[in-house]
Amino acid sequence: MTVKVLHVFSPDYKTRFGGQTFTWKYNFSNWNDPNVAHYVFDFEKHFIDDARDAINFEYPSIQKQASRWERTKWVFSLLSTLIRHEGDYDILHIHILLWGGLFVGSWAKWRKKPAMYESILLDSDTPGGILPEKFGRLKIRLLKSYKAILAISEYLAKDYRKFGFSANQVFTLVNSVDEKIFYPVKTAEEKRLLRKRINLPSDAIALVFVGSVIERKGLDVLIRAFIESSSKRSDLYLLIVGPKNGNEQPSLDEGFVNNLYLLVNQNNLSERVTFMGLIQDRQELAEIYRASDIFVFPSRKEGLGNVILEAMACGLPVLVSQLPVLDKIIKHRDNGIVVPIDDVDALSESILMLSGDLPLAGKIGHNAHTYVAKNFGFSSWQAQLVKIYNALLS
């Protein structure tokens, strides 16, 4: 018997970039277990579509965020579609915490359909962060109606258990990494050619950041640390990969981004700092990792951060902030370097330390690759998710 899983993403998942959709585009395209079939609720069609067909799209050059009216229509369309196609799926896998997503848990419980919510970001969709919100207690009560919560890190799972979710209700499953795409550079010549494509000097020490250009990701800390460290090393360059304007991410704070540009220009670093924008092609993203020397991610808050695992898989030493979700993944000076959150000086010193000790950087990068290859392969992730789906049906 094939288990049919219906996934529900945000109403604008095709018109607005989101890390969750980006991750599941990869998961659906690589899925090879015939015992589980994936489907996606398509708001535009008011229909349930095969998952691979549903995610076979490119984000538009000018992205669009769903309006309040569209989100309201989405709720009614979702519920009517779930009722109309109730016999066409066995499990509901929800990826969005809008009211429609919250109500699905209660409806599914009433209809005796197992439903699971996937939690990805500390505070934004965990009880500790939800509780202070308006209607926070109601939201938590609705979340408790789900048969299962799938947390992408143990730290998120702990937050749910702390607020009364049962141990049997909360599962932890860290996202996987595609080792066929994200792997270390093989030769110096390959690296030289990769750098030539992106106009990066062959003798540069290249730092790379990947993620949305927003305050939560600590880009202001990174720019200030780069200003400090680059004054001591003229061979340092910084690549920033991620949505950089309203066209690429409608909710972006363009004032914040403009301030970053201003800082860079005021310090005469525009030739050494490149804002590369949104890169949708995973192969192209992997090549940027391989063209680089050090991955820097000074985020203030994360659910986990897939990009950290991708950079580690590519053999880069990762320089990250001291996030609780990384406690069991990054071992300081073994497979990464950890600095305090918001500490510009510590970040700058660590950049200089790694760039000045390439043997140490290489050793840390090698350990990072080995750790990810051992623990975060797709086959293992898929097998664990199948077990969770079967547990929901039991």
Image (cartoon, rainbow, N blue to C red):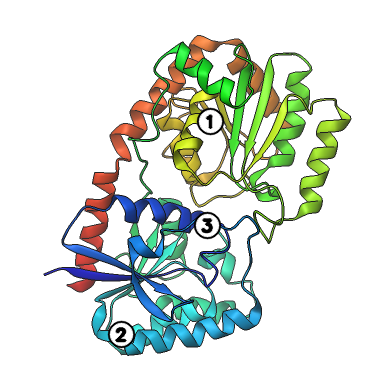
Give the image quarter of residue 15.
Answer: bottom right
Q: Which amino acid, by three-letter code, is at mark 2?
A: His
Q: Secondary structure at mark 3?
A: loop
Quarter of the image containing the C terminus?
bottom left
| Residues at marks 2 and 1, CA–CA distance in whole angstroms | 43 Å
The disc, 3 or 1, on the residue closer to the chain's N-terminal end is 3
Hey, what amino acid is under mark 1?
Ile
Residue 104 screen position, x and y as percent: 41, 81
Q: Residue furthest right?
A: 266
Q: Earlier in the sequence, mark 2 or mark 1?
A: 2
Q: Residues within 10 Å of mark 3 (few under 14, many from 20)?
A: some
SS class, disc 2: loop
Q: Is label 2 or label 3 in front?
A: 2
Q: Which residue sits at x=37%, y=49%?
A: 174
Q: Which residue is mark 2?
A: 85
Q: Which residue is mark 3?
A: 121
Q: Is residue 148 above or below residue 257?
A: below
Which label sits on residue 92?
none
Please identify the quarter of the rendering in which residue 204 is found. Answer: top right
